[in-house]
Image (tube, grey):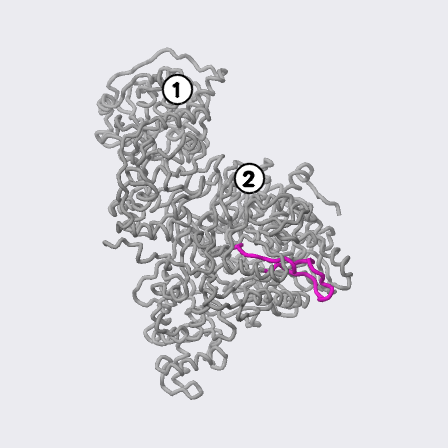
Amino acid sequence: MLSRARKLLLAMAVLAPSLSGCTHAHGGGRVDRQNFALIERGRYLVTLGDCTACHSDPTRSDSPFGGGHPVPTPFGTLLAPNITPDPATGIGNWTAQQFDDAVRRGRMPDGRRLYPAMPFPYFARMSAADVRAIWAYLNTVKPVHHVVVADQLPFPLSLRVSMIFWDWLYYHPGQWRPRADESAAWNRGSYIVRGPGHCGACHTPKTFLGGDERSHELQGYSLQGWFAPDLTGDPAHGLALWSAKDIVAYLKTGHNRFDAASGPMAEEVKDSSSGMSAEDLAAIATYLKGEESTSRRRAALAAADLDMVAGAAIYRDICAGCHKIDGSGVPYLIPDLAGSAAVASRDPATVLRVILHGAASVATREEPTGPQMPSYGWQLDDAQVAAVATYVRNSWGHSAGRVPESAARAARQTPSASAP
Amino acid sequence: MSRIRRRDLLTGAALALAGGAAARAGVLKGELPWRSDAVSPPPRVEPGPWQFFTPEELPTIEALADRIIPPDAETPGGKDAGCVVFLDRQLAGAYGSAEGLYERPPFIQGVEQQGPQSSKTPAQTYRAALQALDQYCREGGGSGLPRGKRFAELALEEQDEVLHGLEGGTVHLSGLDAKQFFDALRKDIQDGFFADPIYGGNRDMCAWKMIGFPGARYDYRDWVNRHNERYPLSPVSIGGRADWTPRHR
Amino acid sequence: MPRRLPHKDVAIVGLGWTGSILANELTDAGLEVMAIERGPWRAAATDYPPNYAQDELRYRIRHELFLQPAQTTFTFRNRMSERALPIRNWGAFMPPNGVGGGGVHWNAETWRFLPSDFVLRSHLTKRYGARFLPADMTIQDWGVTYAELEPHYDRFEYLCGTCGQAGNLRGKILEGGNPFEGPRSRPYPNPPQQQPFSHTLFAQAARQLGYKPFPQPSGNLSQAYRNPLGVRQGPCSYCGFCEWFGCGNYSKASPQTTILPVLVRKPNFTARDQCEVTRINLEPSGRRATGVTFVDTSGQEWEQPADLVLLCAYTIFNVQLLMLSGIGQRYDPVANRGVIGRNFTHQTISDVVSFFDPKKFIFNPFIASGAIGMCIDEFNGDNFDHGPYGFVGGGYMGQVQTNGRPIETTPVPPGTPKWGAKWKQAVKENYLSAIKPGTGVHGSMYSYRDVYLDLDPTYKDRFGRPLVRITMDFHENELKQNRFLTDRFAAIFQAMGARQMDKQYRRAPYDITDYQTTHLCGGAIMGTDPKTSALNRYLQSWDVPNLFVMGASAFPQNAGYNPTGTLAALAYWSAQAIRTQYLKNPGPLVHA
């Protein structure tokens, strides 16, 4: 199974003794199953929010949303709950308000707090109407009777009380509000990216407690041996080369003229963004292209640098057959190393991982090819991996610094290396 | 899937294990199969003890390798090019045991165009032939060879004479088809000379350098239109080349 | 005891080119399809990546991607009077194995046959008279015409992204293409590949001699391409490791790089790899197939029930499954009766290796692709008057050299010893300045009464099933053809300035140890008469109407081209008949 690292960021909704007591919400009423417009809106929002990534078990394809697959995380083994309308084990008995409290406030009907792997700090920015639509839709999916066993998080994370502190630090409730000085498309993009799309869950750097570094929103973050790239217009590390059209193609098809989605992003494309509307994708692109850059370019390593010399030899001998001597690749098939978002990231995790262990890009209806990159870990030693990574990160306009041999060694041993 | 098992599947060796805990058939559905690190690169031949040849056989096979590919001023001969190491590992491995070939009886000699029908594996043939060859030489070869000398102890001209006899079918070795053995030997030594150095022969890509073959390169898009111009880059092996390692290390 | 799987609409035996094409067409028609493949799944990044695919010893010499004789093989003899012996290690041809079949490791030479090839007997009889043909030659018309197949050739070429120069566009002869080809409805989807030095020189010399050379149609791509299914390929990098090897950079057309990415996404498609079909199951009447039986790697037997069975294995295995399942009457060459095993053919290949002055010529033979080359078609099929020469048939010829891999391609001038200092010196001197086209003369082989397939009485496979017995030898017609073609081929190298040539004529007897091509054809041929063909014009079994048999086993005789383009066109042709005729009214599509 492809890494579900994306959903492992922090922790998962876990149950613990309640401190705040029950918050029996009222109101919300029953689902009107004939309100097709509302239900369809909810279905689409579930796609936008990629709920299936955590709440569906890929090994149980007949029971979507019936609860997640057990996933080892740095904090312990976690499971996402059953969100089908099964009354006993799912959300069948929840009211709309109880559902809203869970999605936007991280509170269970009995008052227990959710861990923020359920990205409620993002979902808090959603409108009440959108959350209600999601609730309405989830009440129409096939009920699955499936008890999801709670977490086995180690102390002190197993104590729900710790979440109070976390919420105080990182949970900032409040509706998302449009900016009057920006276009409707920018505002819609901002809503998706910062709200239901929860892009920052992977792409925003985290504090040691797993909260977002709000001053570095979307500037890239390393997780599970992959690096979710900088989505800002940063010329050294971000998407400066990508046009809005490139962003749309990437999100819709998993591929564009520069790059191919693999690893956790492959799953995001498959389950979520490939199903987004053209308008929403364009809105996301508009918003991301409006993000300002913060860093300055530095000088690339000299071609005569010894790592660069060795890296150039390796690149010429074994990489150019696909990526071409000038790094330009083949549009929509083989990534353009000059324009790939992963190559010049602050953190070389993705480059090292892909060189060492290989990667499969996502296949979508529009781009079904799903090309795969072979593993070179058997062929290159750590110094050689570091050298060729250094070379691609300091060529064709990149200046992303030297990759030390120790980073290659660590990437070789990364625990998820054995995972697909 | 571990490398070994993957390789077994590829070569069909898993079939030999049928009935045991062999790999079961797979189902393709939904998406293209993929696993990280799922590669089956060739095993790298490392220097070390001989795996097939005995101390008695070594001088003979090394002498044979150097007559089939004699050393010259620019390029090593079969022995120094590693052809015997190559052959040693091949005979100790799948090739030596005729793995994958059809080995059901009856074994009946047919006409030449029906192909070899021996029940002996290459390893068994080499074992018998090297001994028989030395025996033949010690007995004076039936024609003018000095008696009591093993093949490796003969003068180079005498060695060549024996090989011509094997090739031409005039030298007979007891218990085997000497001509067929010589054809296989010649081919095996030459295979080792030209195969990727990862298999133990073609040391330092000496054979590739001799002829101007660039080896395991995969991209000549920049040279396909450069007609009648010598290709400028040095050869590269599947195992790499010295320039891949940063010089400061 | 076989375990029974859920019923499917279609069971496909073998997931190579034809199996993939049929599976894609029939899943589009809404049918539930199960494909069963004997070998493993294979793809570039995990099985032949560009950092070890280029291993001559492993793939060319030890044949790693191919079926292993231990799994199953054939027996061989030249004549009925001889005792057949098993092929213990592959030689004359290499049966494929695994998902993608031969499409993984072919050269991707993507030809169409000539219009006259499909009506061969009537055409030759009309032009030369029936007595011009040898008495024991059993050539037949196919029952399908070039015009009928043209749209299907076109589909395959656009699927693959075939690179070439049209020579006959809707009847208009175009400069630079093959003027002898049948009219094509569209140009090739991609321009020809670039040509290395020796290939270019060959074309120049051929032009000087009055021929019309043209680039060989190639499934190694000259540029990036997106096919009508949306699947993408990259440009070929001329690595010189094509035939025998998988392509590491998505630039050779194969089921993996053209169809399978789309096919596996379909909910109504499933494939099982590493499962060998052992039998087609029939109703007691013998007139209807009920599905297939296969064995997985653990030895477990399974039964896959299906309404429609499509036999898409390699030529001889199609024939073997028909024989072992008791479908159709087995061919008896003495009585000249029966159809299964009849009209078995191969190809008549020869080569001219030529040696040029190393001081003047650097050919860099390692820069090549599988289907690179410049060819002439003046001596193919019936493109010339055979009257004065006393034989029929022909072939294309060309400088189609695919590699400079040194185990295989270190030619030395005639008279050089095979080993020793002189050999070493000659290898060194000639490597860069010799031309070894490989299958430079690609001649037809026509069918004969005494060249056929049946079951061996002695040798068995690992399941205890009898091996197929091949009885084959060259006939005088083909040997004459080959002498004629090889001499004309050599004349072109002479004109190029070769200082020495090694004319390697094809000679009898047929030798099972000498690689020629893997283009074995016939044994379950198509035609218009159930007495002389196993299949009707839609590749439907005359005997079991819910069984269709794809592949070159349907060719009544072999033409002077590589067969893949034609067997793929036939697959599309058959798929169309199934979709538009058979599904509406399952039963015989032709009433004999």
Image spot of residue C285 (x, y percent): 69, 47
A217 up-or-down from C105: above or below: above
Image spot of residue C94 (x, y percent): 53, 59
Q: Is residue B21 left or right of residue A219?
A: right
Name the foreground residue: C251 vs C575: C251
Image spot of residue A327 (x, y percent): 38, 45
Q: Is residue A10 visible?
A: no
Mark 1: which secondary structure?
A: loop
C257 up-or-down from A208: above or below: below
Q: Which residues are magenta?
A: C370-397
Q: Label 2: few (<14), some or many (≥20) within 10 Å? A: some
How far apart, in angstroms, are the residues tagged by discs 2 and 1? 38 Å
For the stretch drawn in magenta, what is the main secondary structure?
loop
Residue at horizontal 40 percent and vertical 57 percent from the top: B216
Of tags 2 and 1, the one toward the viewer is 1
Q: Please give the residue where the numbered disc 1 appears in the rendered image.
A: A183
Mark 2: which secondary structure?
A: loop
Q: Please give the residue where the numbered disc 2 appears in the rendered image.
A: C228
Q: Which mark is residue B239?
A: none
Name the foreground residue: C231 vs C73: C231
Residue C371 included in the magenta stretch of the image: yes
Farthest residue in the top direction?
Answer: A27
> Disc 2: which chain?
C
Residue B246 included in the magenta stretch of the image: no
